[in-house]
Amino acid sequence: MPTAIAVTSADLVLPPTDQQTPTAALLQAPDAQPLEAALVGMNVMLERYGYVVAVYPASIATAHERRLHTIRSMLETDRLALLKLDLPPLGIAVLVRQLRQLSICDFSAGVVASAARLLSHYIYAGALLNSVTKLDRVPVSLKSHAKSWMPGSQFGVLANPDPQLIKISSSGTGAGAGGGVGGGSGAGAGLSGPEFATQLLVGKGTLVSDWVTATLAPAWQVSGVQETGLPADSPRWWGTAKMIEFAAFLPDISVLYQLVASVRREKCHWCGIELIGDRCGFCSAPLTPPENQSRAAGVLNQGSP
């Protein structure tokens, strides 16, 4: 029986990559669903699947997050994992799809939940913006703020795994404007990209530009470009509606499986569930003692993960 994956917004559920990838359940906000109905729905999922891994953004409304914790508390269950992620919306959607792929593999629910922290390091999530005056997710210099007021300004921003910001020149090439530039396979585009094989997912907003597909994608040597709708929360997350959001990710389920399987599994000393990494995905307890923490066995290289 696969582990159930749940989300707090329908636009975080990307189309499946194959016929085997299951969808994700929607955990609605308090103003859209009474508490009693939410409790019944969660109880049904727990009875059917055994475990539920709920993924939600750090930018979620306080009332919605409180609802999730209320459900877990009232059901008195330790089989509901609440994963709060500080990734851009499109990056979260990519990670959710990867967890959906892993949920049907021979991994326990605890491994699937704790794999989220591991896999997030392999998602390169960013955006092309027309302004950074309201961007508070990535460090922005005063110089970059000043350039935001210039007509036609565009900025390439990477929020994960390492924050970077560049000014895009009128010719479409990147020029350093905030640090963190250089190295990696994406140096030609100004933003340091992944050094392993990826595909690129692009969510187009109202900004008109081909920089992401014509400059960034070739520089990052992606094996393919996919387009999708822009998540509803993206303009608020990035501080502007004139944007194009993107996320480079590992598309092959066999690579994801190998990556997760390469990490030594442990038992949570608090709830007893299986985990990988240094923290339990269900109760958030850290792995102890520290010397028992493990990392992935290898490093993914460009073209040969």
Image: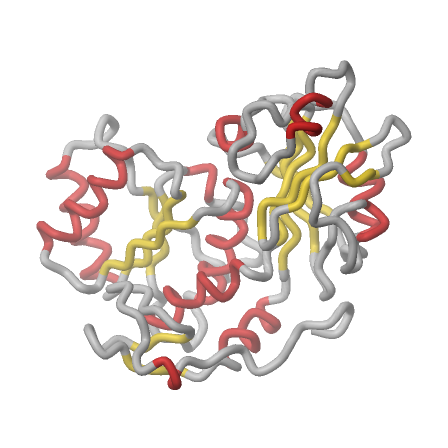
Image quarter of residue 139: top right
Residue at 61% over, 72% down: 255
| Quadrant occupied by the N terminus | bottom left
Spot occupied by residue 253 in the image (x, y as percentages of width and height): 58, 67
> Which residue, as the protein is rendered here, is positioned at the far front?
142
Say which quadrant the C terminus sits in.
bottom right
Residue ID at (40%, 43%): 57
Q: Is residue 168 above or below residue 119?
A: above
Q: Residue 87: image x %, image y %?
A: 49, 46
The mark tally for this picture is: 0
Give the left or right position of residue 268, taking residue 7 as reference. Answer: left
Residue 76 image position (x, y, % from top left): 10, 58
Vertical relation: 125 (above or below) 109: above
Q: Nearer the viewer, residue 94 or 38?
A: 94
Q: Is residue 65 left or right of residue 70?
A: right
Q: Residue at x 43, y 51 (%)?
A: 23
Q: Image point 44% across, 67% down: which residue?
A: 115
Quadrant in the picture for residue 82: bottom left
- Name which quarter of the figure residue 304 lies in: bottom right
Q: Position of residue 193 (x, y in %)?
A: 73, 55
Q: Is residue 302 above or below residue 235?
A: below
Residue at the extreme right of the image, as rendered: 171
Between residue 299 and residue 53, name the one nearer to us.
Answer: 299
- Model colouring: secondary structure
